[in-house]
């Protein structure tokens, strides 16, 4: 099994453990040898130890895997194998030929100086592997002087040498011919696939346009920029199943662990998409519009609910929002802010009406003794700082925020044509609707129409932003977002999958630890409120401890690692696992191959619940029931963060009640809301955990359901997210042997880590980039394929693997790898010269490169679409209990 995999065990979202952390993991799983010994054990699911979610997300690569194999230059590779064999055969004869030549020298007469020199030179060159530059007449002269037995071996050596020279002479021409007639055309064959064209237009409009306008094929050995991009996207579409792209489609499948399994399958799938305008667009248009028309329409205002007094008169504090663009995506940054205001203004904000109108508040300001001009300036400043808030028009549960903004514009319409943009917003909405149409026969004209539509949407947003006087703003990476779904999948997962997952669940139950950040929060709570204490000011407590949960050392200082403490046995923890299914080559035993494992439930599935298909309805219903099951005796309560502006955070309604966090828009009935000031936090001395209640004493289980991994850069909301996940899974160190040790071997091998029939970590080879540069990448074209193939044989490396550069881990709040375009694993076929070019670009930027076995293999692609096998991944959710 060595052809295919997706990513490597969650090493980009979780901070990797130091060596101390790795030892802790090894202590808990006893040792790797013991895990290997358990390989033959097949466990049955223990209902008391593990509970499975009643659904799985099945992700399917858009293109069949065979499209990557079609890129191989088979004639060239056959010639490569022939040359390597001929070189080996010559090498096997080397000692014999050296001995023959050595014995010939003393038999030559003293006056045969030229022949003696020729014989000695040939002996030296045979020893050193230099076999060119000899005429047949020279070799015939030597052959004539050999003994009968010697002549037979020497003739055999000459024949092999001649065959090798002819092979080496022809390989460059063979490769060039195949590169132009096989590799390059087959790479562009993906452009005839409607799903690929559709996804490429979203993924990179520039690449799609370049592909449309390409006049002729390049002729250089190295791929040009278009070919590198096309290959990268083809790999995404055929070898990966990223949930953040349109190069795959997904579906929700029922999972009944106690029922007999009816393995899901599909004949002719029906593909649909949920295409929508980036939520950040209506969000920032709304804010700019409100600022422009507030006085004209006498806009309703809400005083920031978190605003409170502290210290001397006129000193106020609040949790305030600031809209930013983070890594090309919209984000609302929350920060704890302090203000020093005029005492009369502060008193008006704290003790005056909390809901007012723009002009009413303006008159109240003027009544404090300031001029109208000054009052207007103060109003604007209060609005921009997030103290006075406009009416909400959308929230995380709104599937069509652009329509909600159109309704808002109609309600609070301005008579000033300069600030009106509803016609542009309507046009954007219509363009998005047209983009969602899948065509069975996607033509060049269709792609051109898509690209023009995407470009038009960006232009319309610019015009709209200018209408509300927003001249300078950061552009979003994507104006339109899309999730692709497949309908028509028959069957469901059952007992077979449950048995396969039993070993994974058993292992995870030994890896549960108390989150380091949660432990610090717990210590701060006990210090402030005592053991068994109660806190009725939860927001204030989180503000106090928010900046004490992580260590941020000064630049250059070493990060001090604090090992987490193992959780108390029996404690439940929710886990989301992304896995692939395979079979053992020798026994046929089902295997589970782990791609990634995350703490928490629901948060990587919820955003896909929008939509009208029966699969999306299944996902919504299953998720809602699953959250209730996992919360046990507590009530699951949704924690929304940035749901109004970020599509990764928005999701359908899944819980009966929702936490209303300051600054987070929420348009649900008051009876369905728990406000932050209604939260009660208590310390349970028996479990030594913090427990949340509402003001009526009902126990609640706070569930963070956004798809963005919580980051310390969030500030106060990060502290809130810690309450939703007290526990974490311990993980082994996955980094290179050492970053700068020049004495380290060129290649360091880390074997698989397994537990029963679960492969927790694939086999990995850490290779120095200096080795790759000197051995693999000295030449181009066929000569590169020769060098790489010989190296693969000598080092027993796989032909197909996933490569990833090593990252230096820093203490920053946003890891350096998050900003690196090469951060994701790259699927590499080392027998494909274009793949090698992509790999070469990685080696230029790091000391070590990891090669991870491509597992499952091609034969394990169990899901067929139109009779062709596709890479698949399952996302499953389970709750295990700590051991």
Image (cartoon, rainbow, N blue to C red):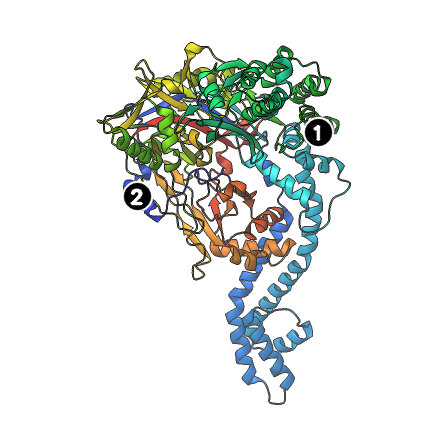
Residue 783 % position (x, y): 62, 57
The image quarter containing residue 206 is: top right
Q: Which mark is residue 455?
A: 1
Can you name the residue that lies furthest to the bottom here? 110
Give me the residue at 48% from left, 51% from top. 797
**Mark-to-mark CA distance, 1 and 2:** 52 Å
Residue 336 visible in the displayed image:
no
Residue 459 % position (x, y): 71, 28
Q: Is residue 24 left or right of residue 111?
A: left
Q: Is residue 14 left or right of residue 302?
A: left
Residue 244 visible in the displayed image:
yes
658, 727: nearer the viewer:
658
Pointer 1 local density, CA inside 10 Å: few below 14, some 14–19, many at least 20: few
805, 309: nearer the viewer:
309
Residue 787 % position (x, y): 57, 57
Under tag 1, what secondary structure? helix
Under tag 2, what secondary structure? helix
Give me the residue at 51% from left, 40% from top. 818
Q: Is residue 540 above or below residue 151?
A: above
853, 549: nearer the viewer:
549
For the C terminus, the image quarter is top left
Front: mark 1 or 2: 1
Q: Is residue 145 above or below residue 210?
A: below
- Residue beneath label 2, please? 24
Give me the residue at 60% from left, 40% from top. 232
- Badge 1 or badge 2: first in the primary sequence: 2
Q: Is residue 562 left or right of residue 847?
A: left
Can you name the residue that lies furthest to the front here? 369
């Amino acid at each position: 099994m060595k052809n295919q995999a997706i990513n490597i065990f969650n090493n980009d979202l979780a901070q990797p453990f130091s060596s101390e952390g790795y030892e802790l993991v090894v202590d808990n799983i006893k040792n790797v040898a013991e895990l290997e010994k358990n390989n033959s054990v097949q466990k049955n699911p223990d209902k008391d130890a593990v509970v499975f979610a009643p659904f799985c997300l099945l992700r399917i690569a858009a293109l069949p895997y065979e499209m990557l194999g079609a890129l191989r230059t088979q004639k060239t590779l056959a010639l490569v194998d022939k040359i390597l064999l001929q070189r080996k055969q010559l090498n096997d004869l080397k000692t014999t030929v050296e001995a023959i030549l050595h014995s010939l020298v003393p038999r030559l007469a003293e006056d045969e100086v030229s022949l003696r020199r020729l014989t000695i030179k040939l002996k030296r060159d045979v020893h050193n592997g230099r076999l060119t530059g000899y005429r047949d007449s020279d070799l015939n002269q030597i052959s004539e002087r050999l003994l009968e037995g010697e002549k037979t071996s020497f003739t055999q050596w000459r024949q092999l040498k001649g065959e090798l020279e002819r092979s080496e002479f022809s390989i460059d021409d063979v490769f060039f011919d195949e590169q132009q007639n096989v590799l390059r055309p087959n790479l562009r064959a993906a452009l005839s696939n409607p799903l690929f064209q559709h996804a490429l237009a979203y993924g990179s409009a520039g690449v799609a346009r370049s592909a449309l306008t390409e006049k002729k094929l390049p002729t250089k050995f190295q791929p040009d920029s278009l070919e590198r991009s096309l290959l990268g996207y083809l790999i995404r579409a055929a070898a990966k199943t990223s949930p953040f792209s349109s190069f795959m489609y997904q579906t929700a499948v029922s999972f009944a662990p106690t029922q007999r399994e009816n393995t899901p399958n599909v004949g002719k799938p029906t593909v649909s998409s949920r295409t929508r305008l980036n939520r950040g667009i209506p969000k920032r248009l709304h804010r700019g519009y409100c600022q422009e028309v507030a006085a004209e329409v006498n806009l309703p205002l809400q005083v920031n609910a978190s605003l409170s007094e502290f210290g001397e008169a006129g000193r106020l504090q609040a949790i305030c929002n600031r809209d930013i663009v983070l890594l090309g995506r919209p984000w609302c940054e929350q920060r704890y802010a302090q203000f020093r205001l005029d005492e009369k203004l502060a008193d008006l904000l704290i003790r005056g009406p909390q809901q007012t109108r723009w002009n009413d508040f303006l008159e109240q300001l003027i009544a404090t003794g300031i001029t109208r001009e000054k009052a207007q300036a103060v109003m604007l400043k209060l609005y921009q700082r997030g103290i006075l808030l406009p009416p909400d028009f959308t929230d995380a549960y709104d599937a069509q925020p652009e329509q909600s903004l159109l309704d808002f514009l109609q309600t609070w319409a301005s008579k000033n044509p300069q600030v009106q943009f509803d016609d542009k917003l309507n046009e954007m909405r219509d363009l998005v609707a047209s983009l969602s149409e899948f065509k069975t026969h996607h033509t060049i004209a269709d792609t051109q129409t898509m690209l023009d539509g995407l470009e038009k949407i960006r232009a319309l947003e610019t015009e709209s932003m200018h209408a509300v006087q927003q001249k300078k703003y950061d552009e979003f990476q994507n104006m339109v977002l899309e999730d692709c779904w497949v309908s028509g999948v028959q069957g469901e997962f059952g007992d077979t999958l449950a048995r396969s997952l039993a070993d994974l669940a058993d292992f995870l139950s030994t890896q549960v630890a108390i989150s380091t950040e949660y432990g610090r929060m717990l210590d701060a709570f006990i210090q402030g409120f005592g053991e068994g204490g109660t806190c009725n000011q939860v927001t204030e407590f989180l503000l106090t401890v928010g900046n004490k949960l992580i260590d941020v050392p000064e630049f250059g200082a070493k990060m001090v690692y604090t090992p987490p403490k193992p959780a108390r046995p029996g404690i439940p923890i929710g886990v989301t696992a992304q896995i692939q299914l395979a079979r053992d080559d020798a026994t046929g035993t089902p295997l589970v191959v782990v791609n990634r494992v995350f703490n928490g439930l629901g948060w990587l599935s919820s955003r896909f619940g929008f939509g009208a298909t029966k699969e999306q309805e299944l996902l919504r219903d299953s998720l809602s029931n699953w959250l209730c099951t996992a919360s046990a005796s507590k009530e699951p309560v949704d924690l929304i963060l940035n749901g109004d502006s970020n599509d990764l955070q928005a999701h359908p309604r899944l819980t009966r009640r929702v936490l209303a966090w300051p600054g987070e828009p929420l348009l649900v009935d008051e009876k369905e809301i728990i406000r932050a000031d209604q939260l009660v936090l208590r310390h349970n001395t028996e479990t030594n955990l913090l427990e949340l209640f509402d003001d009526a004493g009902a126990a609640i289980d706070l569930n963070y359901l956004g798809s963005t991994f919580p980051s310390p850069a969030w500030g106060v909301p990060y502290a809130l997210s810690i309450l939703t996940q007290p526990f974490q899974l311990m993980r082994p160190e996955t980094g290179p042997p050492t970053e700068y040790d020049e004495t380290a071997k060129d290649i360091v091998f880390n074997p698989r880590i397994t537990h029963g029939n679960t492969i927790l970590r694939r086999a990995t080879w850490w290779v120095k980039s200096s080795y790759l540069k000197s051995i693999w990448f000295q030449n181009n074209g066929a000569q590169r394929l020769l060098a790489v193939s010989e190296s693969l044989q000598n080092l027993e490396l796989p032909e197909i693997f996933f490569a990833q550069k090593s990252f230096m881990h820093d203490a920053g709040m946003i890891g350096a790898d998050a900003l690196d375009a090469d951060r994701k694993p790259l699927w590499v076929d080392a027998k494909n010269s274009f793949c090698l070019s992509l790999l070469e670009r990685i080696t230029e930027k790091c000391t070590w490169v990891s090669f991870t076995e491509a597992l499952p293999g091609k034969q394990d692609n169990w899901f067929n679409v139109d009779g062709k096998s596709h890479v698949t991944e399952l996302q499953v959710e389970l709750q295990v209990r700590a051991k």
